[in-house]
Structures are given as C-alpha cells and as structure tokens.
Image (tube, grey):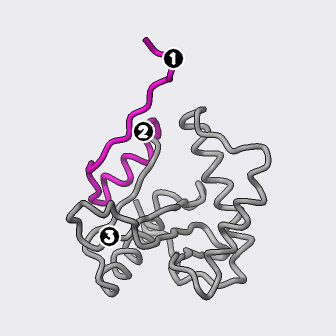
C-alpha cells in the first residue's frame, strides 16, 4: 500500500456538494453490504439538511475532508451522548466516513482517522466510538485495523420470530 498524496483539512461550506456526493456513495455501499440498509424514498432532503447542519457555525459536528485533485473522502464526528448512568469518559462519536473507491488502500482513510484522533485529544475526548454494519466485512476490517474493537453489540430479530 502506497500512501496517496491526499491532504486532510477541516471541511468548509464550499465542500458541501462533494461531501453530499460522497455521503450517497456511503449509503449505496451500505446497501450493497447489507440490503436491509436502505434509504427511504424521500430521504434526499433530510440528508441534505443533516449535511447542511454540519456546516452550521453552531454545530457540534466536525467534518474533515481528504483531497487530491478533488475531494476523495470525509469523516464527521460529534460528542457522543452517553447514557447518564454509565461512568464513561468523554467520547467522540464518528458518525459518517467514506473514501472514494478510486482512492482506497492509499492511506486516505488512515489520514482521516489520524485527524479525528488529533481532534479528540486536543478537545479532551478520551475515547472514540464508531458503528458500522455487521455484514460489511470491508468496513469492519478497516476499523479493526485502525485499532477499534467491540464495546457494544446491537442485535436484531424479526418481531414475529418464534
């Protein structure tokens, strides 16, 4: 694996369209990994509202982008809302991350995670959490390679299962 010459920086409002395009790539890949993961027919406006919120001056979400000659990846994080009864350290929740397939296996994902770790440490976060689809072997392998391990597991069952 050779490191791709990608620059990682904080996202700016001018990155909105490219981030949206990458977000839809993330959603499509989630569906390919697990057909149960699918967007509602009218989700586009809601997704645009979420991404617009990331660029709001009052947001708690931080977004980094990786660029070469164009944006090839992004990651979004925000402070985790921890259960009030748990004694957990300040935690950063990595909510969304994707690297364009043409830029994978070149260090872009690692560079984005490095930016998140630096942000976490600089802002007093002791822990970082990320969730991914259980059936997305590629994503699971990446996050494990980045040093993430199991903490909680979410299980699902059809309501009518006997």
Q: In the image, is residue 91 part of the stretch drawn in magenta?
A: no
Q: Residues within 10 Å of mark 3 (few under 14, many from 20)?
A: some
Q: Are marks 2 and 3 in contact (CB under 8 Å)?
A: no
The percent coordinates of residue 9 (x first, y second) are 52, 83
| Secondary structure under the numbered disc 2 in the rendered image | loop
Quadrant (top left/top right/bottom left/bottom right) for the C terminus: top left
First of labels 3, 1 by sequence position: 3
Say which residue appears at 45% left-offset and 26% top-offset: 157
Marks 1, 2: nearer the viewer = 1
Q: In the rendered view, would you say 40 is above or below 85? A: above
The percent coordinates of residue 28 (x first, y second) are 65, 46
Q: Which residue is mark 1?
A: 160
Between marks 3 and 1, how big is the CA–CA gap?
A: 36 Å
Q: Which residue is mark 3?
A: 91
| Secondary structure under the numbered disc 1 in the rendered image | loop
Q: Which residue is mark 2?
A: 134
Marks 2, 3: nearer the viewer = 3
Q: What span is colored magenta in the figure?
A: 135-162
Q: Nearer the viewer, residue 50 or 28?
A: 50
């Amino acid at each position: 694996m050779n490191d791709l010459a990608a620059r990682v920086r904080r996202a700016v409002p001018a990155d909105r369209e490219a981030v949206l395009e990458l977000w839809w790539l993330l959603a499509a890949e989630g569906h390919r990994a697990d057909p149960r993961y699918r967007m509602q027919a009218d989700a586009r406006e809601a997704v645009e509202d979420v991404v617009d919120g990331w660029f709001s001056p009052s947001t708690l979400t931080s977004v980094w982008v990786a660029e070469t000659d164009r944006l090839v990846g992004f990651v979004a994080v925000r402070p985790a809302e921890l259960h009030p009864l748990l004694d957990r350290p300040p935690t950063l929740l990595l909510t969304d991350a994707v690297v364009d397939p043409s830029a994978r296996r070149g260090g872009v994902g690692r560079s984005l995670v490095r930016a998140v770790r630096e942000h976490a440490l600089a802002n007093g976060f002791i822990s970082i959490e990320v969730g991914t689809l259980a059936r997305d072997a590629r994503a699971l392998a990446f996050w494990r390679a980045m040093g993430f391990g199991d903490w909680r597991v979410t299980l699902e069952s059809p309501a009518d299962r006997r």
